[in-house]
């Protein structure tokens, strides 16, 4: 016991000498540690338990008008949909392009955790004018690593164009994206494909801020079909 | 039931309760309230500082009782504390509350205590909040101790039980000032239980077992007191102990003499809060509905209906079944009145949070134990009795499965009815990101972090950033001088919008969910971000 106490005293003495030595050295160089007085956090009671859909509007602003060429029409409705996870946890793959955009239960499909994609076959290659995606909007969420690719190759091996990518740390391995993360709202996210011609649209995501699952209420693809 | 069988079964229940309460205590992210309490305790641990705050955070017992746990686990400063160390405190008191039920054996019987202990051990709400670093489980423990000591004293008066009741009462008050609701319920229930007598009791003389009850001539003579004198002496001892205990804690062991007076003045604060239309106003049926039946969206079904049904049987047993003695009936009726009054009181107060279920629900659980025991005895046929026993046991097993689900599968999922303003698991990704970035900053844990968010969006950041020595907290961007000087800026959405023009060019931003529908934005200085990305690419 006495030995332990002695040992602690000796170690503390050495540590003290070392610390004062370092401080003296810093002072000798004409410098001293800048000790900032930073404000402390305010103690406060239990916050509100928010459990209502879309209670908080993040920006409160509408997206505004988006202009497309005349003759542009919805080309994704009831088109074949495939996915990386063909056995969803909730719902069916087909609901991605069934025209139902309600945020309630029963209108979305839930895919497994981690990186997953859905793919829509538009049946013809055509200039794409707008893609609108609703992942889930009964609660404010941010979906991670949203990447939207288009191609004429159904396997996305060749001729792949990435038209949206907000995977800023490349955690999904599809390349670093420069697009911003966004919070899901009932308006959906409008992505501008700038007339890129393609038959297939593939949308990736990698979980969300509420859980690790991937959801889709609806995806709409607008194009100007070839005459 | 023989003693060995009782001891064996009780031990099994305690072991089960410990398993549900002590494992994976760090699983759930720290709640806003837990982080507040943790920082308060950190000040006491590091600097011996504690001053009672009459505006919030309740009494001091949680902090003082956390000290031995922290020291035993070798934590001598805030940064060395972990979620597990802190949550061990309520977890142990949750187990302790079950052990205290042993004092009720002479009052309600072995079978009722066993069923009650089982209910307390596996109730989802009890398990969930036994793993939560707030005051409620401590209040539950001291309340059970207070009621047990009070009734043991009623049964066989002694100065030891009087002091024990005073100690538990003092600790209840030093845990939560709102314990006055429980004190009021106990007093009213005691009065009603003693006033209520059925026809048989009115004509019946007191049986032998009540001989020696406080104030009875036999007892006073035995102790050498003049009749009635002992009652006053025990009252003095009990009240004296209660006042001394609460005085010591509220005054921080006489370092803050005003503390005890402040605790009285806090009644005004809590009275206003209880009635005002704030965040936590819920209908009167909120607690009972949550316990009886709850289902949210695609989430599973939750019910503690079995306890409620058996509690009704316990109430019937208290008034209809012939207990052995008047004293037994008196205890049972007290439990009934206490449970009904406290349930009504908590339900009528508009301010409601799920952890406030505990102080009245313990009464329902003990009554459910009495109900189960009475029903098992009520069946004359052995096979029907065995079948009923198995059915109830299966019901309790289902409760245990729900407790597991609530605490281990859905600990932070809003579909769990006991999850309330809980920090989302996604928030831990923000913490991990900050910790990962620290390695790439020259100042490491001294890198400057600025948090600019309202107080409701700040917690539990101070807990998770406790290791970083240069973290400042502002509620508005206007007050935070040059946010762009920091390596990392954490804001709420509102402040992110305000700072957009100043941060966009030189910071990378990421969203994280603090709580459902509440986001934080993590802004990382571009140089730091690039270093981080480079290291990831190299890996």
Image: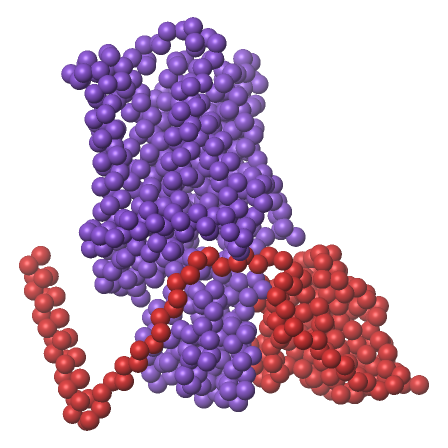
Chain colours: A red, B purple
- The residue shown at (54%, 32%) is B308
Q: Nearer the viewer, residue B178 or B321?
A: B178
B394 relative to B203, above or below: below
Please, is residue B337 above or below residue B40 in the view?
above
Which residue does the image show at 41% across and 83% down from the upper left? B481
- Asked if residue B254 lies left or right of residue B17, the reply is left
Q: Residue furthest right?
A: A227
- Counting from the top left corner in percent of width and height, residue B304 is at 55, 38
Task: Judge by depth and name the residue closer to the eye, B522 or B403.
Answer: B522
Relative horizontal placement of residue A175, taking residue B255 as reference (left or right)? right
Count of all numbered marks drawn on residues in the image: 0
The answer to whether one can see residue B487 in this image is: no
Residue B168 on image: x %, y %: 30, 37
Q: Is residue A30 above or below residue A145?
A: below
From this view, report whether residue A113 is shown above or below residue B301.
below
| Location of residue A13 in the rendering, given as x and y in whole percent from the top left corner | 10, 73
Say which quadrant the N terminus of chain B sits in.
top left
Q: Residue furthest bottom?
A: A29
Q: Residue at x 47, y 72 (%)?
A: B453
Question: Based on the displayed image, in which of its 4 quarters is residue B384 positioned?
Answer: top right
Q: Residue at x 67, y 58 (%)?
A: A89
């Amino acid at each position: 016991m006495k030995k332990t106490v002695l040992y602690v005293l000796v170690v503390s003495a050495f540590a003290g000498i070392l610390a004062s030595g370092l401080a003296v050295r810093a002072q000798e160089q004409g410098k001293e540690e800048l000790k900032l007085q930073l404000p402390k956090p305010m103690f406060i009671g239990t916050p509100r338990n928010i459990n209502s859909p879309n209670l908080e509007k993040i920006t409160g602003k509408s997206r505004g008008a988006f202009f497309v060429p005349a003759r542009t029409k919805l080309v994704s409705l009831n088109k074949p949909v495939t996915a990386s996870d063909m056995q969803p946890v909730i719902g069916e793959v087909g609901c991605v392009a069934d025209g139902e955009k309600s945020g309630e239960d029963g209108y979305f499909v839930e895919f497994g955790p981690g990186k997953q994609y859905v793919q829509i076959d538009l049946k013809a290659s055509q200039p794409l004018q707008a893609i609108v995606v609703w992942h889930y909007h009964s609660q404010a969420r941010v979906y991670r690593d949203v990447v939207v690719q288009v191609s004429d190759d159904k396997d996305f091996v060749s001729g792949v164009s990435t038209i949206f990518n907000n995977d800023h740390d490349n955690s999904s391995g599809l390349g670093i994206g420069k697009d911003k993360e966004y919070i899901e709202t009932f308006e959906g996210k409008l992505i501008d494909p700038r007339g890129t011609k393609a038959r297939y649209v593939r949308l990736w995501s990698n979980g969300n801020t509420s859980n690790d699952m991937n959801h889709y209420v609806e995806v709409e693809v607008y194009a100007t079909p070839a005459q | 039931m023989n003693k060995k069988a009782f001891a064996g079964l009780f031990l099994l229940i305690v072991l089960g309760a410990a398993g549900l309460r002590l494992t994976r205590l760090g699983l759930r992210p720290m709640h806003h309230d837990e982080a507040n309490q943790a920082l308060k305790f950190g000040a006491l641990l590091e600097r011996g500082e504690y001053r009672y705050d009459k505006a919030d955070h309740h009494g001091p017992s949680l902090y003082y009782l956390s000290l031995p746990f922290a020291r035993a686990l070798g934590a001598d400063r805030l940064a060395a504390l972990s979620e597990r160390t802190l949550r061990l405190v309520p977890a142990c008191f949750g187990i302790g509350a079950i052990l205290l039920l042993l004092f009720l054996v002479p009052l309600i019987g072995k079978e009722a205590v066993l069923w009650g202990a089982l209910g307390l051990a596996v109730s989802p709400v009890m398990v969930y909040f036994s793993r939560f670093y707030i005051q409620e489980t401590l209040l539950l423990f001291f309340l059970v101790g207070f009621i047990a000591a009070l009734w043991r004293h009623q049964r066989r008066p002694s100065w030891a039980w009087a002091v024990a009741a005073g100690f538990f009462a003092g600790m209840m008050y030093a845990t939560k000032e709102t314990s006055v609701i429980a004190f009021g319920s106990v007093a009213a229930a005691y009065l009603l239980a003693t006033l209520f007598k059925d026809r048989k009791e009115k004509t019946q003389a007191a049986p032998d077992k009540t001989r020696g009850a406080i104030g009875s001539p036999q007892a006073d003579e035995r102790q050498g007191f003049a009749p009635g004198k002992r009652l006053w002496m025990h009252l003095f001892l009990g009240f004296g102990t209660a006042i001394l205990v609460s005085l010591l804690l509220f005054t921080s062991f006489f370092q803050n003499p005003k503390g005890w007076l402040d605790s009285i003045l806090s009644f005004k604060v809590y009275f206003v809060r209880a009635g005002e239309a704030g965040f936590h106003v819920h209908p009167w049926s909120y607690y009972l509905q949550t316990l009886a039946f709850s289902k949210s969206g695609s989430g599973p079904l939750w019910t503690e209906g079995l306890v409620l049904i058996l509690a009704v049987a316990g109430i019937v047993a208290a008034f209809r079944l012939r207990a052995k003695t008047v004293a037994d009936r008196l205890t049972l009726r007290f439990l009934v009145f206490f449970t009904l009054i406290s349930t009504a009181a908590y339900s009528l107060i508009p301010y409601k949070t799920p952890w406030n279920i505990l102080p009245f629900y313990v009464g329902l659980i003990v009554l459910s134990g009495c109900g189960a025991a009475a029903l098992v005895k009520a069946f004359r046929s052995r096979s029907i009795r065995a079948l009923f026993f198995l059915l109830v046991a299966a019901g309790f097993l289902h409760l245990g499965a729900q407790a597991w689900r609530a605490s281990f599968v859905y600990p932070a999922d809003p579909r769990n009815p006991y999850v309330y303003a809980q920090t989302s698991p996604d928030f831990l990704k923000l913490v991990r990101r900050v910790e990962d970035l620290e390695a790439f900053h020259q100042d490491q844990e001294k890198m400057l972090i600025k948090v600019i968010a309202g107080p409701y969006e700040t917690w539990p950041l101070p807990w998770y950033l406790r290791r970083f020595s240069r973290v400042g907290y502002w509620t508005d961007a206007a007050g935070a001088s040059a946010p762009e000087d920091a390596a990392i800026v954490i804001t709420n959405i509102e402040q992110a919008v305000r700072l957009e023009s100043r941060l966009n060019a030189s910071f990378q931003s990421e969203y994280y969910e603090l709580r459902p529908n509440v986001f934080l934005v993590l802004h990382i200085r571009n140089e730091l971000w690039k270093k981080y990305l480079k290291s990831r690419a190299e890996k």
